[in-house]
Image (spheres, rainbow, N blue to C red):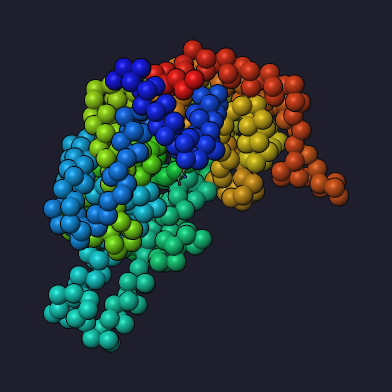
Amino acid sequence: MSHNAESTAFRSALEVIRAVEPRVADAIGAELTDQRESLKLIASENYASPATLLAMGNWFSDKYAEGTVGRRFYAGCQNVDTVEALAAEHARELFGAAHAYVQPHSGIDANLVAFWAVLADRVESPALKKAQVRQVNDLTEADWFALRRELGNQRMLGMSLDAGGHLTHGFRPNISGKMFDQRSYGTDPVTGLIDYDRVAEAAREFKPLILVGGYSAYPRKVNFRILREIADSVGATFMVDMAHFAGLVAGKVFTGDFDPVPHAHIVTTTTHKSLRGPRGGMVLCQPELADQVDRGCPMVLGGPLPHVMAAKAVALAEARRPDFADYAQRIVDNSQALAEGLLRRGATLVTGGTDNHLVLIDVSGYGLTGRQAEQALLDSGIVTNRNSVPQDPNGAWYTSGIRIGTPALTTRGLGTAEMDQTAELIHTVLTQTTAGANADGTPSKAKYTLDADLADKIAQQATDLLAPHPLYPGIDLA
Ligand code: DSN
């Protein structure tokens, strides 16, 4: 697509929107400006391609399509079938998966689909078989009551939240924690790495129905072959949530033992993080779980979003191109350059470095909470998010960490030299920020001071760093 075509497409779209509600058109334009001007280091964000963005803004949005390809509860779904089948085919080919379900609207949705598929396969189906009935409506009241109790009495073992696991891996504030009896495996207190012997021991003691691998704030590779062996040794279903690192799997940076797809019974992901697609989710699974996974809607999902499935098909087609592997490798090269730059300047990193797209700085070394550090960096034009570190004394709200990731800046074309300069900017802000005090003189976890001129100077340096790498260079809205 030529640069002119991209500009024309987005300008025309904004003109049409402006005629109805100019404030929305203005906000869309302002969002592009903000994204262009920020040094975006949020590990879970990226910039989708113009083709992916355009595939989402159209009349597919108007179509209901409950059901699956060729088997819908609504008439007239032939074009939805085309895009859903394409997205699933690209996903299967890209990841070497037996089955792909591309309807989930988000990572949480994908995880819910996966949990209920496993519960249906491991708990509900045997109960139906035992009662010699085809479906739950045919159960007696007593059998249905017993099955419901059994469904609500299953166990899950996942990585603890402060070690980098995700809220949806069985934590109480989330529905997954209310559905499952959950226990966590953490990381080694000295190295910060997953201790597979401890995971095996926890699995032997707890005997989970589901062993969950995957993370949202762990900066290392995970050996999925070993986790599968642990799952098998206790009869657990092995599920991996690869939302954060799906792009590294797609780009063949994580292969062999580090690629979850050949090892897990079921894999969930989002499509918008390192994979660089539209906001959404997806489930990949072994053939024996396919039928249950395909029941995701209406089991736990509202109607599929055909416009987003169209965009998933476009983004997955992009990820199958050879240049995506180069992009994925550059994400990791950049992350490692950022980590090395920070370490060289004296920062403390959880696990002492990174193998993937993210770096977790323990900002207690700078005398700050995560919240203070996040705000001071934001004042300086650097967008990050605060995150717990293992055994975090400041809890999940204030935290002691800053999570930074490179998928977005790598999409813009920044390289390892610029990552070193980014490390310098981050380190300067954090060393120049001072934790504040409450009115009664006690240390505050939120207040801080940072010289405004210094913040402005850093923000200008961040802008200068971005200038040679314009975001969406083909789009000119002026
Ligand atoms: N919100 C995503 C993240 O930032 O990691 C996952 O929930």
Residue shown at 60% from the left, 47% from the top: 392
Residue 453, percent from left and from top: 75, 21
User: In the figure, 299 relative to 251: above or below?
Assistant: below
Residue 38, percent from left and from top: 55, 26
Q: Is residue 59 left or right of residue 341?
A: left
Residue 144 seen by the camera = yes
Image quadrant where one finds the N terminus: top left
Residue 147, percent from left and from top: 29, 77
Residue 276 seen by the camera = no
**Snapshot quadrant of residue 346:** top right
Query: Looking at this view, is 229 or 296 the one in front?
Result: 296
User: In the figure, 419 relative to 29: above or below?
Assistant: above
Query: Looking at this view, is 297 or 167 the one in front?
Result: 297
Residue shown at 64% from the left, 22% from the top: 459
Q: Is residue 268 left or right of residue 402?
A: left
Residue positioned most to the front: 19
Residue 234, percent from left and from top: 28, 60
**Snapshot quadrant of residue 381:** top right
Q: How many marks?
A: 0
Residue positioned most to the right: 440
Residue shown at 53% from the left, 33% from the top: 26
Q: Is residue 378 left or right of residue 16?
A: right
Residue shown at 67% from the left, 30% from the top: 379
